[in-house]
Image (cartoon, helix red, strand yellow):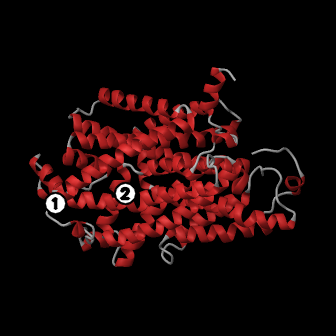
Amino acid sequence: MNNTSIAESRAEDHALNSVPDAERKGWVALSWTTTGLVTGLVQLFLGALITFVAGFKVALAAGVLVTAVGALMGWGCGHIAYRSGLSSTVLSRKFGFGHKGSIVSSVIFAFMIIGFLAIENALLYSGFVFYFHLHDTITTRIMVYGLMTVAWVLLTAYGFNLVARVSTYTLAAFLVVLAYITYLVVSGSSESLSTVASFPSQFPAAALQGMGITSEWGKFIFAVNMLIGSAGALALVDADIGRYAKRSRDIGIAALFGNLAMDIFMLALGGIIMHAGAAQLIAYYQSNGMSLEAAQQASLAGPDSITAAFIVFSGGLGALLMVLAQSKTQVLNTYSASLSLSNLADVLSGWRPGRIVFVVVANIIGLVMLYGKLLSLVNSYVTLLGVLTTAFASVIIGDYFIVRPQQRKQGTEPKTVDACNWAGVATTVIAFVLSHWVLNTIVPIEFVTTVTVCLIVYPVLRLWVLRPSLSLVAGGPQGA
């Protein structure tokens, strides 16, 4: 194979076919990637928000539950990807959704992951503006967003090996810087570490009631519902990463580390840092002319506040943390988005220009989101998207672990891929409607309804109601 074909192969990175055994990795390499994806400033902000609403101990209990559920979902999807060597959206063709049905999973997952790409870009941009005291002009935006986009494209262009290497180095540096900043903030606080790590809800009762929270159980439900959306998306990313696993346990360990990092480590640190540094941050805003009330609101007003906080706490070191946190996350977001868009284009039109094209397309869509209403839609519907991604993961897992063994016994297991697996599509719609609108007052933790419905309804529909056609069982064109 000449140098040109080798470069093309690396750029393509098996986007639409199985990863060969020679390119498989162990759990250490995979864990750097799954952990690197979730250790960003947005997760620190969510940690601060959730702990401030629910209280530290209640939020941490919710994090433990979501870690367990997310790790199991991630291992389930990752195991199937390990066995097939396929990414999450290509995987959904064979298990759960069919060829055309995978359009649904590709659109939702791509919209969510590119939305995260856009949010993280906006967060990094605001950090640069804050740190360098730049004016928010069209010229500044073109320059900063342009440089970031070029960086993400170049760092993602040559496939998983480069992505994993970038994530490894930046994650290691990020953890060192984060540990030092945490030490600075906590040691400079007037409160002891035990007090900082056990604070109650910081929101007044009236504000909590406005959010529909009137009890400790309500706080727990809020925390779980906020965390589970990211866990559902991470489970699909675990499949994108799990196709490179040498063994099933490799992706299982990597999925566990990713969920531990997201739902416990970042949750706890986000709460501890923002609580310990609240007085310092409020004093900074007041010194810049804000009233006490406005300063208190600005200190946790949105993801931008976490960027400002780290720069206020530690200046250049905080700016370095911002860059390290966001660069690895953006590279991984771009990577998963390119895989999803590759499947979408292939299913819709058979267009296969190569994964590198979709690396560029994903970043262009992310830029468009910044200047339209799409980014606000992602922010508004992130919980809904989380329910949908959880449903997708559950249908894929239900197909592989429940339906396929029964079909083998019955002699009805498909030998080819359905044009559209209507059982999977219908189950996703049913689970979404029941969990978010019909049963949400009875079972307020929405993922419980989502997973339960998928693991019950899908097998019933697939095995007895919307069974695969005899032509699929008997034979036909092979492949995904």
Residue 116 against residue 456 in the figure, above or below: above
Labels 2 & 1 near each other (Cβ < 8 A): no
Query: At x 52% / y 46%, what residue is drawn?
Result: 29
Assign the C terminus to one quadrant of the image.
Answer: top right
Spot the residue most to the right.
474
Task: Give the image location of residue 5, x and y in percent.
Answer: 66, 24
Assign the N terminus to one quadrant of the image.
Answer: top right
Circle 2 residue: 266
Element class at badge 2: helix
Residue 50 against residue 416 in the figure, above or below: below
Circle 1 residue: 189
Image side of residue 441 versus residue 212, left or right: right
Task: Give the image location of residue 250, x and y in percent.
Answer: 58, 54
- Crowd class of label 1 (few under 14; some 14 to 19; many from 20; radius 10 Å): some
- Crowd class of label 2 (few under 14; some 14 to 19; many from 20; radius 10 Å): many
Query: At x 49% / y 43%, what residue is drawn?
Result: 333
The answer to whether one can see residue 126 in this image is yes
Task: Give the image location of residue 227, x and y in percent.
Answer: 44, 62
* Towards the viewer: 349 or 311: 311
Element class at badge 1: loop
* Towards the viewer: 430 or 335: 335
Query: At x 67% / y 50%, what residue is drawn?
Result: 91
